Amino acid sequence: MAHNLRNRRWYRYLSHFCRVSFALAFLVSGFFKAIDPWGTILVVKNYLVAYDITLPEWVVTIFSIWLCGAELMMGCMLLFKVRIRMVSVFSVLSMTFFTILTFLSATFIPVEDCGCFGEMWKLTPWQSFAKNLVLLPMALCFWYRYRPDRIFAFSKLEFFLMCFFFTAAMSVGTYCYYHLPIMDLLPYKVGTNIAEEMESARTKQSSEEVVLVYRNTRTGRVREFSINDKAWHNDKRWEWVETRVESDEDGVEPMILEFYISNQEGEKTAELLAMEEKLYMLCVMDFERVTDKIKERFAAVERYAEQNGGRVIYLTPEHLPANAPVPLYNIDAKTMKTMLRADYGLVELERGVITGKYNYRDIPY
């Protein structure tokens, strides 16, 4: 009976439809995650925090890049019918896992953003769960259709295509991790007038409050801070969990409202955005991990700014020392990673407009 079902015309058409639809969903999802591996890293960290799991930073990074690439690779293999039997097994297993995970995110262990389509398309936990409820039966459909095939019976062409898709998919994520996303889908893209965007966002919300959620690295307890509270300016003690904008109105929380820069004297956001001279903001996630190469790149920016009448400041989520030899300013860790997908790099502002963004490896000066 099962053999007859697999050979019926309508079932073959249904299986073909499910395979192509599933492949396209994975291609879109994998591509928009692969071009922004830093976003996937943040999502994975959110899940680890929610489940109280601690992993080394390098493990999270490698896993996130692999996850993006694996999804993109599976989509390519399904679309071009490369070892469908093998890929269908992974499709069913992965969709079963993510269906359970998104159900838990929507119910018992809340995680605000699943990161299913990167920054291209934001889904709520329930929307992610509903999406997976559609994709899981599709995976089961084409898995059952190709179940009689051998899993590892690769032809030479299939083996070549699998290696090609793997290399291409992992290369996209790796390149974007070491440089910047090839497509910037975040609110701080080049050409954005930050002050105008903040004002526009405020007019859409009757009231809002930026809340920073951090976890104590010693006790593991989670605590909420207001944006004006200086206690979170200690990267050794507090680990960022999330930043949210609480509003009396429903709707998408505009990330642009989270842009807040301060120093020992207090908030400096408006002052810096209104500067007439060009502003070179050097972003540093951790000063203790700054290498000689990074120092050389940053020194080149300082020399260039001095020669061309610009101003250089350093942005960091770390605690600000009382007598720093360079102009240091605080910024929330998530806001910095939203503005610049790198631990170390440069953001250029001209009268509040972003005119350039660079990973430290690509600084042109």
Image (cartoon, rainbow, N blue to C red):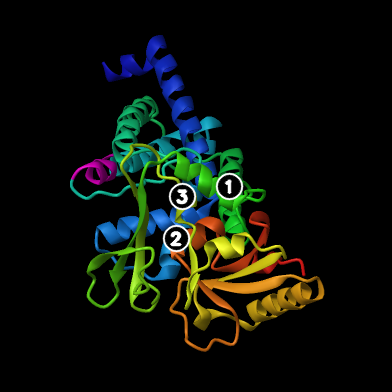
Quarter of the image holding residue 54?
bottom left
Quarter of the rendering occupied by the C terminus? bottom right
Q: Position of residue 66 (x, y in %)?
A: 47, 54
Left or right relative to 182: residue 32: left
* Numbered tag placed on residue 94 in the rendering: none
According to the picture, the residue beneath numbered tag 2 turns out to be: 334
* Numbered tag placed on residue 196 in the rendering: 1
According to the picture, the residue beneath numbered tag 3 turns out to be: 255
Residues 276 and 297: in front is: 276
On the question of residue 150 being in view, the answer is no
Secondary structure of the residue carrying numbered label 3:
helix
Q: Residues within 10 Å of mark 1 (few under 14, many from 20)?
A: few
Q: Which residues are magenta?
A: 99-107
Label 3 or label 2, whichever comes before in sequence order? 3
Label 1 or label 2, whichever comes before in sequence order? 1
Q: Residue at x 31, y 27 (%)?
A: 137
Measure how far apart labels 3 and 2 are at the Cα level: 10 Å
Q: How many marks?
A: 3
| Residue type pointed to by label 3 | Met
Q: Residue furthest right?
A: 307
Label 1 or label 3, whichever comes before in sequence order? 1
Magenta run includes residue 26: no
Quarter of the rendering occupied by the N terminus? top left
Left or right relative to 332: residue 133: left
Quarter of the image holding residue 247?
top left
Measure how far apart labels 1 and 2 are at the Cα level: 21 Å
Q: Position of residue 50 (x, y in %)?
A: 26, 57
